[in-house]
Image (cartoon, rainbow, N blue to C red):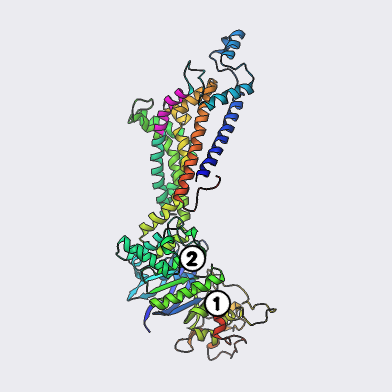
Amino acid sequence: MRNYFLSRLGYMLVTLLIIVTATFFFMQLLPGTPFNNPEKLTEQQLLSLNEKYGLDKPIALQYFIYLGNLLQFDLGLSFQYEGRTVESIIGSRIGPSALIGLQAVVFGTAAGLLLGMISALKHNSFLDYTSVFIAVLGMSVPSFVFAALMQYYLGVKLQWLPAALWRGWEYTIMPSLALSVMVIATVARFIRTEMLEVLGQDYVVTARAKGLTEKAVIVKHVVRNALIPVVTMLGPLTVGIMTGTLVIEKIFAVPGLGEQFTLSIMVNDYSVIMGITLFYSSLFILVVMIVDILYGVLDPRISLKGEG
Amino acid sequence: MEKILSVENLHVSFYSDGGEIAAVRGVSFDVNKGETLAIVGESGSGKSVTAKTLMKLLPKQNSIIKQGDVKYGGKNLVQLTNRDMEKLRGSEISMVFQDPMTSLNPTMTIGKQVMEGLKRHRTMSKKTAYTRTVELLELVGIPDPGERINQYPHQFSGGMRQRVVIAMALACNPKMLIADEPTTALDVTIQAQILELMKELQKKFQTAIILITHDLGVVANMAQRVAVMYAGEIMESGTLDEIFYQPKHPYTWGLLSSMPKLHADRSLPLTPIPGTPPDLSHLPEGCPFAPRCQYALKVCHQYEPGKTKVSTTHTVSCWLEDERAPKVKKPEGIGGMQRGRQSKIAGS
């Protein structure tokens, strides 16, 4: 077990290093400078600004300086916001993203499981076809379409919910709902397939042959086994959604991380771009590891030893 | 002898895109207390469907019991509601399946899986159920049951898993056990052990066994009575001796002569039955075996033969048994085998 964690940790660090390196060098391809109104700067001003931020040094050197700072958990200063650290920017923006993301995942998973299970248990019935249709719709129509429709009908026309901004819990409902559509669709489709597969397994017949009630067969044998693969899918999905989605946050003017990310890319705020990318990837890698551990708990056939 | 189960004129069909598949067509048999009835036949002969019908475990979406009765203890199982059937399954009639690798839930300890049935059908405390489960595991020959009870199926070998499945089936002392090819997926030495175990437990608890198999060696070793199935019908049924020593149906002859023999000349190939079983969605007219039967008469291709009683226990469906039919001698080498040799085949 200890060996497993150590080797996993090693792999995580290597992955992160690759991500940092790739992002760092790709970012050099972005046109323009990180400074405001660069066209009004004189040659001299530009040079001195570059010198101040260390951008005059060779790229390779800049890269190693960044890595050095990173080892001390220093993500650097923002270019856009004078004197603010990248950490503080992420810190102030993650809250709203995490809240609407969490709500979307919890609601979406519950609704998706319900929909998918009904679908599997009533296989090839009208209910099944309806829920498959809903799932396909949710997967194929981008969430910003739902967001815009909801905003218009629920927010503007009916005025049931605030159309945008961030002033209290009711402001989180619509963004969460819009985000959850994709979660519902994904989870429903997944659990349906898994349940149908498990329902065809021999051990389900064995369970029935024991005289268990249909309910016991479904709950103890079918759902339990069908949920295992869903867990793997749910981890990365949660990270993706909780760290903010660029479009939804933009539409509902949620002051979240996704919105900040787009903004920073527009203005070439190098250190913030690096910081958020690193934050996303670390979270992602961490969740994947948690999922793996969870997998070992849920499925006794998988044991966590040796190298990952 | 006390009759505990009787099947009368059972018809079961499946529905697929290709139309109706008549998998079981007019099967009748009885099972007596404490005896073993073997149902033998090729793949697709309807033997497993028959077994699953008795437990009513066929998928409801695409299968239907079209006709017939399954009488057990004064009840007709065909008409029983699902709820009443659940009470019977596992407590009165149990089943052992073919593949022990897939018939256990991989994420549940074997102890829990055995206990489930006990808890469902018997009112007992958790502690008693636990002790009883350890006893059961010991009974079916699992070493170290107190330890093994908390392990998962993947920690068991195939033979050990089948022992667990048997323990599960016998948990509530059922009157009848349906074993659907219980040893097909096991290697030969383990087969013999599992068969011995089943025989031993049968003697102990007076359980009636319906043994579904295509292995005549297993039949010779286990059964008192045999029913030979082909294309969803019972072609011939009788006591073990009648089927092995005085078989009447050409299909039974074919089965017996296609069996490898211990003292036969090894350089000669085995004698297969030519052809393949008929497509159950497009059955030929007349006797379903006629197209493959080297003794087939004209009438065989037009009309199904009726049942002829050879003795009080021996019945056969074949036109050759009609008094107008030409006298056909059964091929050589069939029915001459000694019991001892057959058992050896089963155990080898």
The residue drawn where x is 53% and y is 40% is A6
Return the residue found at the far right. Answer: B267
Q: Residues within 10 Å of mark 2 (few under 14, many from 20)?
A: many
- Describe the element under mark 2 as helix, strand or loop: helix
Q: Which numbered disc, 1 or 2, marks the residue that appears first in the sequence?
A: 2
Q: Quadrant of the C terminus of chain A?
A: top right
Q: Residues within 10 Å of mark 1 (few under 14, many from 20)?
A: many
What number is the disc on residue B346?
Answer: 1
Q: Nearer the viewer, residue B73 or B124?
A: B124
Q: Nearer the viewer, residue B135 or A219?
A: B135
What number is the disc on residue A9?
Answer: none
Amino acid under disc 1: Ala
Query: Do residues under tags 1 and 2 come within 8 Å of each other at their CB atoms?
Result: no
Badge 1 and badge 2 in a common chain: yes
* Image coordinates for residue A16, horizontal then vertical, percent: 55, 33
Residue B328 within the magenta-colored segment of the rendering: no
- Describe the element under mark 1 as helix, strand or loop: helix
Q: Is residue B288 something that shows in the picture? A: no
Span shown in magenta: A87-100
* Image coordinates for residue B280, horizontal then vertical, percent: 53, 70
Amino acid under disc 2: Met
Q: Which chain is indicated by disc 1?
A: B
Residue A91 within the magenta-colored segment of the rendering: yes
A288 left or right of B111 in image = right
Q: Nearer the viewer, residue B15 or A75?
A: A75
Q: Is residue B35 something that shows in the picture? A: yes
Question: Relative to A178, is A56 above or below?
Answer: above
Q: CA distance from mark 1 to mark 2?
A: 19 Å
Q: To which residue does mark 2 refer?
A: B160
The residue drawn where x is 46% and y is 66% is B143
* Image coordinates for residue B120, horizontal then vertical, percent: 33, 63
Which is in the foreground here, disc 1 or disc 2?
2
